[in-house]
Image (cartoon, rainbow, N blue to C red):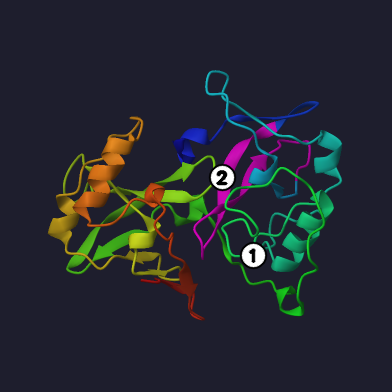
């Protein structure tokens, strides 16, 4: 199911033995555009810590009660590797985190989640990290921080990133929700991360190699409406792209040393 990141904000996080807080935001991998962690607002329980919950631990959301079940105990979360709120999430920390829970490390293997394309619930032995992973390079991006980044077409700016559409099975970011109100009042559009030519994180710019008129003519996105497969098919046809559901290569993004990201063809 496709869900908007902001719509999940505020959902209760329910561990095996009680509530642990609420959904605050998400951290995604800026190479694969996959959500790697849900960031929990735990109130006064674990204040001063950045509490991360991997999709490996998440069950399907209960929309009626606005609850996301977490297949962990409060004690497991409390005893997990601690990270201060003012520190970046380094690969060294992630290695400790995944070893603690016994989950496979997503950076090992050919698929989005390492050995598989989906978060694995089975715990097992993960390979030891290589030396170069002892780095504090902030390769994870916050959905909250990236919201507001400007989208630039071939012939000028056309809007800004307002939200993200997440596949709650693979936890891939399928689309960026673009607000174009300054150009076409009332219209919002969806853009796949794999249609993006370049992202400059330092300049807060997303660049897409298409003219503004082509983007303007794309099927409009209605906020709050379920994204049907028929709508997705029409969107992909408009941009002459094959749907990800058809088994087309997902495409990987390559990050330059300056923080820019280029999509592979």
Residue that carries the numbered disc 1 in the rendered image: 109
Residue 35 percent location from the top left of the image:
56, 51
91 part of magenta stretch: no
Residue 88 drawn above or below residue 163: below
CA–CA distance in space, label 2 to label 1: 27 Å
Residue at 75% x, 67% y: name it: 92
Mark 2 or 1: in front is 1
Label 2 close to label 1 by CB (< 8 Å): no
x, y percent for residue 202: 45, 71
Q: What element carries label 2?
A: strand
Where does residue 31 sit, x and y in percent of width and height? 51, 66
Closer to the camera in the image, 207 or 192:
192
**Left or right of 260 on screen, residue 104:** right
Question: Residue lying furthest top in this view?
Answer: 64
Q: Residue 25 carries which label?
A: 2
Which one is earlier in the sequence, the residue at label 2 or at label 1?
2
Residue shown at the point (47%, 73%) measured from the top left: 254
Region in magenta? 21-47
Identified at 48% across, 79% down, the residue is 256
């Amino acid at each position: 199911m496709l869900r908007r990141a902001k719509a999940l904000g505020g959902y209760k996080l329910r561990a095996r033995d009680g509530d642990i807080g609420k959904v605050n935001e998400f951290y995604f991998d800026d190479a694969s555009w996959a959500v790697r962690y849900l960031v929990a607002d735990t109130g006064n329980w674990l204040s001063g810590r950045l509490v991360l919950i991997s999709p490996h631990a998440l069950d399907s959301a209960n929309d009626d009660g606005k609850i996301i079940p977490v297949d962990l105990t409060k004690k497991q979360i409390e005893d997990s590797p601690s990270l201060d709120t003012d520190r970046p999430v380094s690969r060294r920390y992630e290695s400790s985190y995944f070893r603690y829970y016994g989950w496979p490390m997503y950076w090992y293997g050919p698929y989005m989640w390492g050995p598989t394309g989906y978060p694995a619930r089975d715990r097992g032995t993960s390979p030891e990290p290589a030396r170069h992973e002892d780095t504090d390079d902030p390769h994870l991006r916050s959905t909250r921080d990236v919201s507001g980044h400007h989208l630039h077409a071939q012939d000028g700016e056309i809007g800004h990133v307002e939200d993200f559409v997440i596949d709650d099975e693979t936890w891939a970011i399928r689309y960026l929700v673009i607000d174009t109100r300054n150009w076409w009042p009332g219209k919002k559009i969806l853009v796949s991360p794999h249609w993006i030519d370049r992202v400059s994180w330092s300049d807060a710019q997303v660049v897409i190699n298409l003219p503004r008129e082509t983007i303007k003519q794309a099927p409009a996105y209605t906020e709050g409406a379920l994204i049907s497969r028929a709508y997705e098919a029409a969107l992909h046809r408009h941009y002459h792209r094959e749907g990800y559901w058809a088994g087309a290569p997902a495409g990987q993004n390559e990050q330059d040393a300056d923080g820019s990201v280029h999509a592979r063809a």
